[in-house]
Amino acid sequence: MRTPFMHHCSLRAPVLALALSAVSLFGLPGSEARAQPEPAEIGKQVPGFEIDALRNSERAITPSDFEGRYVLLNLWATWCAPCVEKIPDLREARRRYSSEKLVILNVSFDQSRSKATAFLEKREMPGRHAYVTGGLMGEFGDKFARMPSESASGQVRGLPNLTLVGPEGTVADMAAGDSVDLLEILSEHLSSPQSG
């Protein structure tokens, strides 16, 4: 049986440097980078968030949009090869589980909306799509993009990163890194697969 959130993450030095340098790369003020919102934790209520729909920045997405259904938060970016490699698993998840049972919310961490939108015009990724600003070290990244780490600072962020939220709004599972088996996570929590 898989141990939640304890997957080995093989981050390469450039990716790790990117994650740790997000403050300077994305121009975040030091005070925002040091803010420590409550991170998501298995067994606890999902932290509140309000993020923009990818294609309509006027539309906000919040956890209340999905009450009564499982929600898979799939944190990804076009530059993240392991994220892109998970697309077939996302398609299979959509085939196995109806949208009434499982919502897939793909949250882009790309530097611009246009990069994510252009990518999605060429490759089908099932589910709803959102976009966050602030990079991995921003508020949303701080809540959901944490990677298992030996670091005492807890400042390691990365992709791919998955959070499964149960119908009652409680975090059911979290997994990070390129070895994550998305379909195994879903089968452990969603007892009766359905076509649709």
Image (cartoon, rainbow, N blue to C red):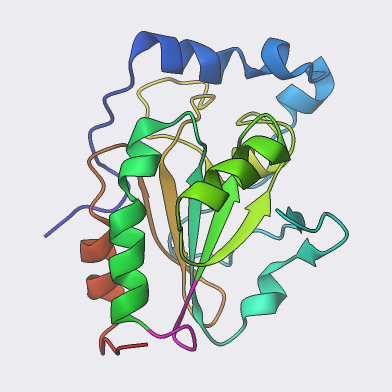
Q: Quadrant of residue 172?
A: bottom left
The verdict on residue 101 being magenta is yes
Left or right placement of residue 20 versus residue 147 in this view:
right
Left or right placement of residue 97 versus residue 138 in this view:
left
Left or right placement of residue 53 versus residue 189 in this view:
right
- Vertical placement of residue 4 versus 185, above or below: above
In depth, the one of 87 and 173 nearer the eye is 87
x and y, in percent, of residue 100 in the image: 49, 89
Residue drawn where x is 56% and y is 87% of the image: 68
Residue drawn where x is 30% and y is 88% of the image: 195
The secondary structure that dominates the magenta segment is: loop
Residue drawn where x is 52% and y is 37% of the image: 77
Residue lying furthest left:
1
- Vertical placement of residue 15 versus 8, above or below: above
Left or right placement of residue 5 versus residue 76 in this view:
left
- Vertical placement of residue 194 versus 135, above or below: below
x and y, in percent, of residue 161 in the image: 43, 44
Rendered-image quadrant of the N terminus: bottom left
Q: Quadrant of residue 27?
A: top right
Residue drawn where x is 41% and y is 40% of the image: 160
In depth, the one of 116 and 173 nearer the eye is 116
Residue lying furthest right:
58
- Magenta residues (range): 98-103
Rendered-image quadrant of the C terminus: bottom left
In depth, the one of 94 and 169 nearer the eye is 94
User: How many badges with numbers are in the image?
Assistant: 0
x and y, in percent, of residue 109 in the image: 60, 38
- Vertical placement of residue 25 versus 33, above or below: above
x and y, in percent, of residue 21 in the image: 60, 12
The verdict on residue 92 being magenta is no
